[in-house]
Amino acid sequence: MQDLSGEDLNVMFNWIKNIVSRGLNSELKQEIEDIFQKEGTVENMVYGIERVIKKEKLDAKLEGRMEGRKEEKKATLYKTAVRLLTKKFGELSEEIKSKMSGLEPETLEIIIDSIFEYENLDDIKKYI
């Protein structure tokens, strides 16, 4: 790299910056931009880029875990709501089950919490 002209280095740095920044959120893109704006050694730039990539991986991993927990909670609430409604009113239609499977966890919690107030399945139709 010592044999590259200043212009060639800029072209190479811009290419690397664009490749590394693809798919990153705006905050991490700005961090990459900041790394390339600072005067420093290539080693420092590589270290900075590595740090940003590790941060992105960690953020994605945490986001995936949170999404997984939300889906797990939703599945548990769905099963509980179907089980309780079935005990109270008998077998539920596939249409009702299908509509309930698309509900948010908060709505499923409302249905479960209000189970003793329902007189028939029409009472839950306002939620589905």
Image (cartoon, helix red, strand yellow):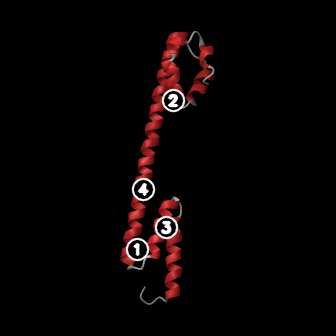
Tell which of 89 and 122 is nearer to you.
Answer: 122
Residue 77, position as x, y percentages in the image? 47, 26
Identity, as a three-letter code, of the amino acid under mark 4: Lys
Q: CA distance from mark 3 to mark 1?
A: 12 Å
Chain-order first, disc 4 or disc 1: 1
Residue 86, above or below 12: above
Quadrant in which the N terminus appears: bottom left
Residue shown at 36% from the left, 76% from the top: 43
Q: Quickly name the residue at label 1.
A: 45
State the SS at label 2: helix
- For mark 2, what is the residue? 106
- Quadrant housing the C terminus: top right
Residue position for label 3? 20
The one of 33 and 74 positioned closer to us in this rendering: 33
Labels 4 and 3: the sequence-earlier one: 3
What label sits on residue 57 in the rendered view? 4
Instruction: Please report contact status of discs 4 and 1: CB closer than 8 Å, yes or no.
Output: no
Question: Which residue is at a point 40% across and 58% down the rendered structure image?
Answer: 55
Q: Earlier in the sequence, mark 2 or mark 4?
A: 4
Q: Disc 4 to disc 1, how far (Cα)?
A: 18 Å
Sequence-first disc among 2 and 3: 3
| Snapshot quadrant of residue 89 | top right
Q: Secondary structure at mark 4?
A: helix
Q: What is the crowding at mark 1: few (fewer than 14 residues within 10 Å), some, or many (at least 20)?
A: some
Callout in the foreground (4, 1):
1
